[in-house]
């Protein structure tokens, strides 16, 4: 039975998982959270490639034939490498929604929020040069957001204050489109939307990635899956993953296992 695999450094990719599960409600999904090595944002490209290859091998062993790299940092560092190393697998990657932000802006100023790894990567520079040359693109690397989402701390006053510290200066600078370039950040979108209300839109690429995944699955000759089994693996702590999963997505009738890799 063919399955769809998704992976991230931690729980962030669940924002993409949620969109894929909505778009393909009958599919078998396997999610891998590499929490032992989270965050990826400060790791070298070489290190991220090795981690991504190891996870891909594991997902292929679980019968995944389509894999969503539900992490912008891993997509920037490893997507081309993974496509070369695993030619039989279809990979779908993430990148910040620079193109829709550059199209939609009226003020001519957009912001891209992502990890340092993504913002310093070649892929981002290429996308920015190709689609956002005519606008001013401010880039911000919010230092503590990934850790907050990993703890499930998405609605405390401290988190709200941290979101405000990042968003307000962007609004004051005239930014009217804010592209999320890290899959952890959509879990902070309610706080961002509250702060930016009426002044800027928040762009999350998850639905576009889910649509693309659904199209690829429909076009491929993969045997259809009808079980809708949902399995999660973490290389970190299973109980803690379960607690945060429930906090982020609500109660899940799903199996969570410790990853043997
Ligand atoms: N969620 C990941 C991303 O989309 C990165 C978080 C991390 O630094 O591990 O970039």
Image (cartoon, grey):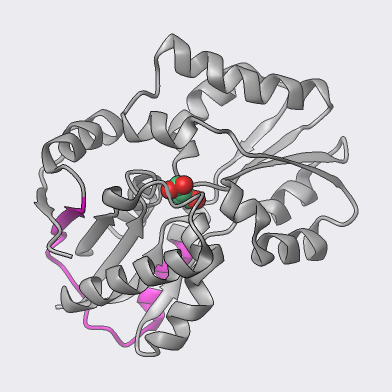
Q: Is residue 226 above or below residue 7?
A: below
Above or below residue 91? Residue 244 is above
Question: What percent of the width, then of the height, locates residue 30?
Answer: 22, 61
**Left or right: 184 as drawn, with respect to 60:** right
Question: Along the horizontal axis of the image, is 168 left or right of 132?
Answer: left
Task: Residue 109: tell me if it is visible.
Answer: yes
Q: Is residue 35 above or below residue 88?
A: above
Observer-nearest residue: 196 or 114? 114
- Residue 147 picture quarter: top left
Work out whether residue 8 or residue 98 is closer to the camera in this orientation and state it.
8
Whether 168 is among the magenta residues is no
- Residue 209, compared with residue 116, is above or below; it is below
Q: Please identify the quarter of the rendering in which residue 163 is found.
A: top right
- The residue shown at (58%, 33%) is 142
Q: Residue furthest top?
A: 157
Residue 150: x and y in percent read 34, 35
Residue at x-position 44% and y-position 37%:
146
Q: Is residue 26 visible?
A: no
* Point 43% across, 65% down: residue: 47
> Where is residue 161 shown, x and y percent of the image?
54, 13
Residue 25 shown left or right of residue 217 in the figure = left
Residue drawn at x 16%, y 60% is 228
Name the quadrant containing residue 180: top right
Q: Is residue 229 magenta?
A: yes
Q: Where does the magenta region start and end?
A: 211-235
């Amino acid at each position: 039975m063919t399955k769809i695999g998704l992976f991230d450094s931690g729980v962030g990719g669940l924002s993409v998982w949620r969109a894929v599960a909505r778009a393909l409600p009958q599919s078998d999904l396997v999610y891998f959270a590499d929490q032992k090595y989270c965050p990826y944002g400060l790791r070298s490209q070489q290190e991220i490639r090795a981690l991504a290859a190891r996870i891909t091998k594991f997902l292929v062993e679980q019968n995944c034939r389509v894999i969503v790299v539900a992490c912008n940092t891993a997509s920037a560092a490893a997507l081309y490498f993974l496509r070369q190393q695993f030619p039989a697998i279809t990979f779908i990657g993430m990148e910040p929604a620079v193109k829709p932000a550059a199209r939609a802006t009226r003020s001519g100023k957009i912001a891209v929020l992502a990890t340092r790894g993504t913002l310093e990567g070649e892929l981002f520079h290429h996308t920015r040069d190709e689609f956002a040359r005519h606008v001013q693109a401010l880039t911000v690397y919010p230092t503590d957001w990934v850790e907050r989402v990993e703890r499930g701390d998405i609605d405390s006053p401290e988190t709200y204050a941290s979101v405000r510290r990042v968003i307000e200066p962007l609004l004051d600078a005239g930014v009217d489109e804010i592209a999320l370039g890290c899959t952890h950040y959509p879990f902070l979108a309610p706080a961002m939307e509250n702060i930016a209300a009426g002044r800027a839109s928040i762009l999350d690429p998850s639905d576009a990635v889910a649509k693309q995944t659904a199209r690829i699955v429909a076009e491929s000759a993969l045997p259809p899956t009808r079980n809708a089994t949902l399995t999660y693996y973490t290389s970190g702590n299973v109980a803690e993953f379960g607690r945060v999963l429930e906090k982020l997505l609500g109660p899940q009738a799903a199996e969570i296992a410790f990853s043997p890799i």
